[in-house]
Amino acid sequence: MRRVPALQCSASRAIEPRMVPGGTKLPPQMDDWQRGVVLLVDKPSGWTSFDVCARVRRLVRVKKVGHAGTLDPMATGLLVVCVGKATKQVDSYQAMEKEYTGTLRLGQATASLDKEEPVCEEMPWKHLKLSDLQEAAAKLTGSQMQKPPMFSALSVNGQKLYTAARKGLEVERKARSILVNQFDVYWEDPAQQDVDFRVICSKGTYVRVLADDLGRNLGTRAHLVALRRERIGDFHVNQAWDLKNLADACRAAGISDEGDYVPKRLRDE
């Protein structure tokens, strides 16, 4: 079993949260969950990170549930979910290196920097070559300052930035220090607008902003059309629970009698 950051409960004794990868046996007792469990979950597209935590909370019947790093609703991939006393270790997981794969679309911009908002600007892109993209991506690696996008869950003066953005407002945001260790692009067919990529970066990095910066630096525009978090530290998405499988395992273990669930927002679509 993989070791995870220890919970400090006294000067002389530490309790390690129990890591439960996908497909392994779940702790059967409520006390086990209260003492601290860490679940790796593969977040489905359309769900918010809060939706996932709410689902886990209902499945394991423990109130204290938190995640270690927000994924946008459009994105899929690894979410580290901490249950019970393991929530004290959220910051430890948030600090770990992240790895993402995804697809960006050249020549088009949106207000949210991803496909969640309509295209608001188009610019020429067919003059670009793979070598141009590779050179521009390389220049976006290393330590840098990055300003969070307006369409984000960050709060400024008590208001979520995305709330202001949907009202057409622009709020002053402070740039934050980030580190991009790797930014690789894969453009198999230069006749197509879509370019695949891989990014390895520090916490707090907005991959949407990297895609937008890449487009601007190439003299065009770009936005995300797909994003998947593959890894957090040494934890990989191929170790994670699918939410349906997690629900089935909870019912089989007698932990929960919750039925299948889809967030109301998605049911209404």
Image (spheres, helix red, strand yellow):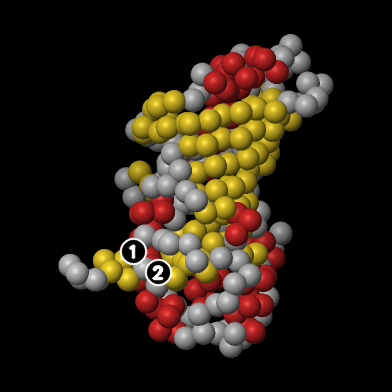
As drawn, 185 above or below 264: above
The residue sitting at the front extreme is 1
As drawn, 205 above or below 127: below
Q: Mark on residue 57?
A: none
* Quadrant placement of the C terminus: bottom right
The residue sitting at the top extreme is 127
Disc 1 marks a residue whose amino acid type is Ala
- Identify the residue under disc 1: 6
As drawn, 9 above or below 96: below
Provide the secondary structure element on which disc 2 rests. Answer: loop
As drawn, 152 above or below 127: below
Q: Nearer the viewer, residue 128 or 184?
A: 184
Mark 1 or mark 2, which has the lower sequence index?
Answer: 1
Q: Mark on residue 17?
A: 2
Using the rendered image of the protein, determine whether residue 118 is visible from the camera's viewpoint: no
Q: Nearer the viewer, residue 81 or 22?
A: 22
Q: CA distance from mark 1 to mark 2?
A: 7 Å
The residue sitting at the left extreme is 11
Pinpoint residue 73: horizontal percent, then vertical percent.
59, 51
User: Residue 9 appears in which quarter of the rendering?
Assistant: bottom left
Pinpoint residue 86: horizontal percent, then vertical percent.
38, 67
Report the residue at 17% width, 67% height from top: 11
**Going by the image, does 234 lie left or right of 269?**
left
Circles 1 and 2, Cβ within 8 Å, touching? The answer is yes
